[in-house]
Amino acid sequence: MDRNWKLAISTASVAILGPGNKQRMRRYGLGRGRMVAYLRLLPLLGLLLADGSRVAAQGSHGIADGKEDWTKEESPFIPGAYIVEYEDGHGEAKLFSDLHNHGVPATKRLNLDYTLFKGASFQLDAIDLDPRSTSAKIASVPSVKQVWPVQRFKRPSGPTVNSTNGDSSHSSDVSDLFRRATSGKDTYAPHVAVQVDKLHAEGFTGKGIKIGIIDTGVDFNHPALGGCFGKGCAISYGRDMVGDDYNGKNTPVPGPEPYSSCDGHGTHVAGIIAARSNPMGFIGAAPGATVGMYRVFGCSGDVGADVAIAAANQAFEDGSDIITLSLGGASGWTEDPFSVVLSRIVDAGVTCTVANGNSGSAGLFLAGTPANGKGVTAVSSVENTDTPFLGTGAFVGTDKSAANQVPFVYTPTDFVFPNITLPVWAATPNVTTDGSYTACNPFNDNAPADLSDKVVLLMYNSSDFVCNSYTQVENLQARGAQYFMFWLDGAGNIWAGNASGLGMTGYSQGVLWQKQLSSGKDLYMTFVQSSSASKAGVFVPNAINPNYIDTFTSWGPTWQADVNPSITTPGGTIMSTWPLSKGGYYIDTGTSMATPVMASIYALLMEARGIRDPKTLLNLVSSTALQLPFYDGKTLYANELAPVAQQGAGLAQAHKAAHISTLLSVPNIAFNDTDNFVKKTSFAIRNTGKKSVTYTLGHTPSLTMYTYGNGDSHFPAPFPNPIAEGASAKLAFSQKKVTIPAGRSADITVVATPPQGLNASAIPVYSGYVTVNGTNGDGLVIPYLGIVGSLAKLPVVDPDFNYMIHYNIYSTDPADDNTIFPLPYPNSSVAYNGANRPDYPAALIQIDAGTPVLRADLIPVGDTKAKVNTTNVLGLDIIGSLSGYPLPFSSRSYYISPFTGMTQEGVVAPEGSYQFVIRALKIYGDVNNPDDYDSKATQTFILKYNETAPA
């Protein structure tokens, strides 16, 4: 999944930022700017936030008529939609007959009739007040073995390309990098980082291996992807499962082939695996592999889990050796059907690689789904060691002559540079009144009075929200400036009211030019009008965070204390193919980009070692990985390994995995939490070499991190989590040294003692690496992870941040008790918008830990109890649930869920007094036991209707 920096709309909720967040900001310990960034990630980046449009159409106003849908609610599950697996010997006809006979009439969505999964998905004709009752009815049907609600997964969405996607330099290194595409040697930095270049040098390309990609489709007409589809082409198989018009809500209409130019994500992923030589200077990591594409996204919207499950099964049926996907959600639970299906595919002999997600800023316990499936390889991301820059070509040098100018790359804007050659003048501390490299304030007398014949070089401080590029350009235009080149110190975009030429480049490029100008050198820039200028890609050594674990990468473990993620590969600022209609090439970032690298490594290993078994392959890449130090976004802890919950086994080392002669029997060890502590476990070492080898056992701890903040708060700590200084487990081995003859194995028992003296209520997660070093030079590891404290005893519902608010005033301040909410009657035909729109009551819900079931119910209060019909659910008489609830297997998150007068089940609440009751099942709790739920009731509100009910 790529990073998505947009403010996410959560399950049945909208995250709203406004003045009322001050108290919450103080609690988080965040300022306003950091708070926005944090809340953008907290509602689970990469998690599909499904649109509960079926219910919203019942409870909102004017939606069916296409009027403003400002109350549209989002849920990660499609209301009333279920996936079932058949009992042996049953099929579709029997299922729908049984459903009808059991009082659960439904309409088919998809037939899921495959070798490893036989079932169907369907939409209920009506939603029950108690979904437990509905689920029980479905499960009681003779033809049904298992039942799940249909989750919807969000479309992968890449970040905006900006100057931090690369720098250019006019040193001699740039010319070397330009020549790389035709050198015949793979020096592409992401390949070097994981030793793919070494396997390429040995002739391994993934030949004979089939990789099935589940994604947004592919522009197979791209020259770097072979320019065709079908037998003999780079993209040789696959299917369009949905068609252009599919949006996650409507019925898929499969197309004839998996072509797509409306979304570039799948094309980018395909290029990472299979790209041929191209002008940008990179190739795919497995260019000899046979690649398939299974398109599961239309040109807009999202995808239902049933469609994704169908695609995975189809990829298996079509003979894929590897299935890779960069989609899913951040839940931390393994029970969803997509995870189950992928685990079955792995058990059947096909390796599955899945992006672990990009929720890293939200801290621990956000393992990706379905990346957390048993046996699935969950992939995290490290930053590229070379920073690519993709943009328009221009030239710079010490004079105007072409012979003394070298190319550089910049990002153009709407203000296109004409065909010009001009001297460069820079804003420096000796000409600015504030001692900066910007034009935020007036210049002193050292600055030229006329800048009309100069290209002005300026720094854009991305953290300065007052002085932006618009202000700087405006200040300079007072001195006649027309042409501007900004160098950015971080992520950002530039704009101006007007200019004759405006562009931006990266930090190191700007620093270099500034130094040259400050030393007295002259610089001249030559531009070609950008519509005819060449497009170019440049790779420059990353001096900021090379091979550092990307801070956006999601953290494990799962809520069942399983080790997650599995492995790490490069996914930060990766250049690859893009639809031709959108430019042909693109730089994207995320675990979406790391995952196809891992799939390619598996293809190379299959070719090199001649094996296909997923368990053996996962053990190989895990045991041979390179462990990386912790990076908190500012500081590299050079002597402290990053936790297993962030990097898994570490950075994959493909060449080592291809040639190692020692095999370990497990990819990792989970010691679980205190209640379920695994004191003793074992693994086997197998010597496949031709000589006897003596192995020495040991372990290297990594940092122990607290899940929750300091003190009594159980609000999850954001990244970087608090470090438990000096805390690590102690491991003892049945043998510290063991000699194993050629072709033989030995079992090793590990006895663990968790770190002592920690605050167990803050859930410290400890981890490290068992080391196995052989006299033959083999050095291997087994990552391990454990938890101090009880997951089952964790408070789930935040005691302070679960209350009723005014939905319409964009504030998270609590509403007064007994507030009167005058609402239009649900299903009203009257359009409400702008100042006329009603003020709905809403439940603000903060869940501080994962929960198998999250409920948000409406209960009558006082005299209203005697006037309404209720249903007893878990010991509480309720009118119904808020739209989108209950949620199965919810992660910790923050929701704002409005109530329009109509419940999830389509019941219109009569006028009266009500409360919202939030209930969350504790980890390992009994779903049918009310005592196993955390609960909190909100303030009372009074519901009034300002219309009569429609006739």
Image (spheres, grey):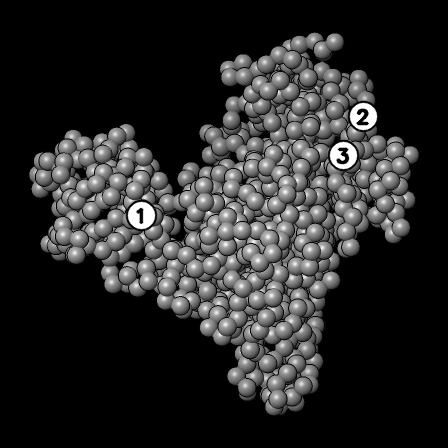
Q: Callout 3, which amino acid?
A: Gln
Looking at the image, tell me whether mark 1 or mark 3 is earlier in sequence order.
3
Q: Return the x and y of residue 813 as percentages of the image width and height.
A: 53, 29
Q: In this view, does 31 lie above or below 861?
A: below
Q: Which residue is drawn at 59% across and 70% down?
A: 607
Q: Which residue position is annotated with label 1?
A: 534
Q: How far separated are the C-alphas under marks 2 and 3?
A: 25 Å
Looking at the image, tell me whether mark 2 or mark 3 is earlier in sequence order.
3
459 and 14: which one is in front?
459
Looking at the image, tell me whether mark 1 or mark 2 is earlier in sequence order.
1
Q: Residue at x 57, y 66 (%)?
A: 207
Picture disc at residue 870 = 2
Q: Is residue 168 above or below residue 10?
A: below
For the residues labelled 1 and 3, say whether their Cβ atoms are less than 8 Å apart: no
570 and 27: which one is in front?
570
Q: Return the x and y of residue 634 as percentages of the image width and height.
A: 39, 55
Q: Callout 2, which amino acid?
A: Thr
Q: Which residue is drawn at 79% across and 28% down?
A: 126
